[in-house]
Image (cartoon, rainbow, N blue to C red):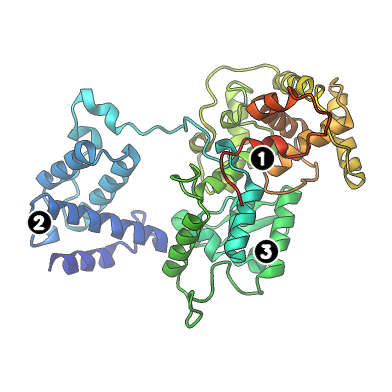
């Protein structure tokens, strides 16, 4: 049967990448599933191929027409499927058979295949008004190990499989979390720098609950009778995500949105406020921006800084000469709003941290009270999935991100119009912006 013959070709070739290196399990599986889907669709379109090697250019044209006009697949999905067919063609000795994607459409329809590199809207949980502490609490209630997995995804930007395979004790090198070779996309090893107290606290929590030598994924199947493999863990993870409503349909985000959350948080501690968070598009020169973006890009497992626009939206082309002034202006606007409401007292154990942040801003000429400092820093901390992040890196940038969130909050405008004198609690604005997520 053609299915069996197709599998023979895939298993004989898909284990090796185009550069000759061994392909990761993820790459092998994705390529196999893509090719199987393409041949299945050909059969549904009425092409009765007896041999996979009989694939011809007319079949590629038919598939492209189906994907573009009938299925209306996303350009990136079409590009990936066509790329896998191009690789398959080299396996069967027809390297030149699959043409460039624009060959299969008219000039008028070229826009249907245009891949937008930069995101047009925030992809992160916070950017979609989803409250992380509530998500963690809901996950914990369903399955505590799921809650730990989601925390690691936010803290270190791990992909789903990377999180499931992660052995927290073995991969923690204090200053960074190592993503082992073969675990990540492309099979590359990478280091994710540990820069915040939220990262350290989350990792400590995970290590305290996961036995040494054990991965984060579930060691046993749900019935507890046998060892679970990766495929079973992925299925279980996906089922739990649907159960807690962490899906595009329910909350507008997926597990990958937690990686986008890390991308934004990581940008802040490197001195950048992404446009996806309301940061100025021309906040620094292009050369300086590219240099800084290289660091969060490497933490995410990418080698090209421009890839980060897929998480951050476009930084634009305008160059600002004074991004510090932009930051202080935005914070000052939030302070005008905060001055109109009754903020809570600062807890005694957090006063030293608040004085540190306040002192940094006052050195720049900004007048801010300790209560206002505390309130804004809580907003920043919550986006890290933590109750409090100790101030260490780029304090003005982190405060600016919180100020933007406050200034843009519809709920805050409602709160400040109330006549009661009760204190506005830390996190109240963020929580009240979150749609219908309730525990």
Report x, y in % for residue 111: 29, 27
Report x, y in % for residue 297: 56, 42
The residue singled out by tag 1 in the image is 431
Front-most of residues 319 and 157: 157
The Cα–Cα distance between marks 2 and 1, rounded to whole angstroms, is 58 Å
Q: Residue at x 87, y 22 (%)?
A: 367
Q: Residue at x 26, y 38 (%)?
A: 72
| Label 2 CA crowd tier, 10 Å (few <14, some 14–19, many 20+) | few
Q: Earlier in the sequence, mark 2 or mark 1?
A: 2
Q: Quadrant of the N terminus?
A: bottom left
The residue singled out by tag 3 in the image is 206
Q: Earlier in the sequence, mark 3 or mark 1?
A: 3
The residue singled out by tag 2 in the image is 54
Q: Secondary structure at mark 1?
A: helix
- Number of on-image labels: 3
Q: Is residue 330 above or below residue 186?
A: above
Front-most of residues 415 and 289: 415
- The reply, left or right, for residue 403 in relation to residue 309 is right
Q: Secondary structure at mark 2?
A: helix
């Amino acid at each position: 049967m053609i299915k069996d013959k197709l599998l023979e070709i895939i298993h004989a070739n898909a284990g090796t990448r185009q550069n000759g290196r061994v392909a990761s399990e993820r790459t092998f599986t994705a390529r196999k599933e893509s090719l199987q889907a393409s041949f299945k669709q050909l059969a549904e379109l009425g092409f009765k191929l007896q041999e996979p090697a009989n694939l011809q250019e007319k079949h590629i044209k038919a598939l492209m027409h189906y994907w573009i006009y009938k299925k209306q697949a996303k350009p990136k999905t079409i590009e990936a499927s066509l790329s896998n067919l191009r690789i398959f063609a080299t396996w069967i000795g027809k390297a030149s058979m699959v043409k460039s994607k624009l060959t299969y459409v008219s000039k008028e329809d070229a826009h249907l295949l245009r891949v937008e590199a930069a995101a047009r809207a925030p992809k992160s949980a916070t950017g979609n008004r989803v409250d992380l502490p509530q998500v963690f609490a809901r996950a914990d209630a369903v399955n505590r190990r799921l809650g730990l997995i989601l925390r690691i995804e936010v803290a270190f930007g791990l992909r789903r499989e990377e999180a499931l395979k992660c052995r927290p004790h073995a991969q923690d090198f204090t200053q960074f979390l190592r993503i082992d070779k073969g675990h990540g996309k492309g099979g590359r090893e990478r280091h994710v720098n540990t820069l915040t107290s939220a990262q350290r606290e989350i990792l400590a929590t995970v290590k305290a609950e996961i036995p040494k030598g054990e991965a984060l994924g579930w060691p046993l199947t749900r019935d507890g009778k046998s060892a679970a493999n990766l495929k079973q863990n992925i299925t279980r993870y996906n089922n739990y995500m649907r159960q807690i409503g962490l899906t595009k349909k329910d909350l507008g985000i997926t597990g990958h949105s937690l990686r986008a959350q890390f991308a934004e948080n990581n940008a802040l501690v490197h001195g950048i406020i992404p446009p996806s968070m309301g940061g100025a598009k021309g906040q620094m020169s292009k050369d300086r921006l590219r240099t800084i973006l290289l660091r969060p890009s490497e933490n995410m497992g990418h080698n090209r800084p421009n890839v980060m626009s897929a998480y951050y939206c476009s930084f634009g082309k305008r160059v600002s000469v004074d991004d510090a002034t932009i930051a202080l202006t935005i914070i000052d606007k939030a302070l005008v709003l905060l001055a109109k409401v009754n903020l809570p007292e600062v807890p005694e154990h957090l006063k030293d941290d608040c004085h540190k942040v306040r002192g940094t801003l006052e050195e720049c000429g900004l007048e801010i009270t300790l209560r206002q400092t505390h309130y804004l820093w809580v907003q920043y901390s919550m986006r890290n999935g933590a109750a409090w992040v100790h101030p260490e890196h780029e304090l003005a940038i982190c405060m600016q991100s919180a100020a933007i969130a406050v200034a843009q909050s519809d709920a805050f405008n409602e709160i400040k119009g109330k006549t009661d004198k009760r204190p506005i609690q830390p996190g109240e604005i963020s929580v009240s912006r979150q749609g219908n997520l309730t525990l």
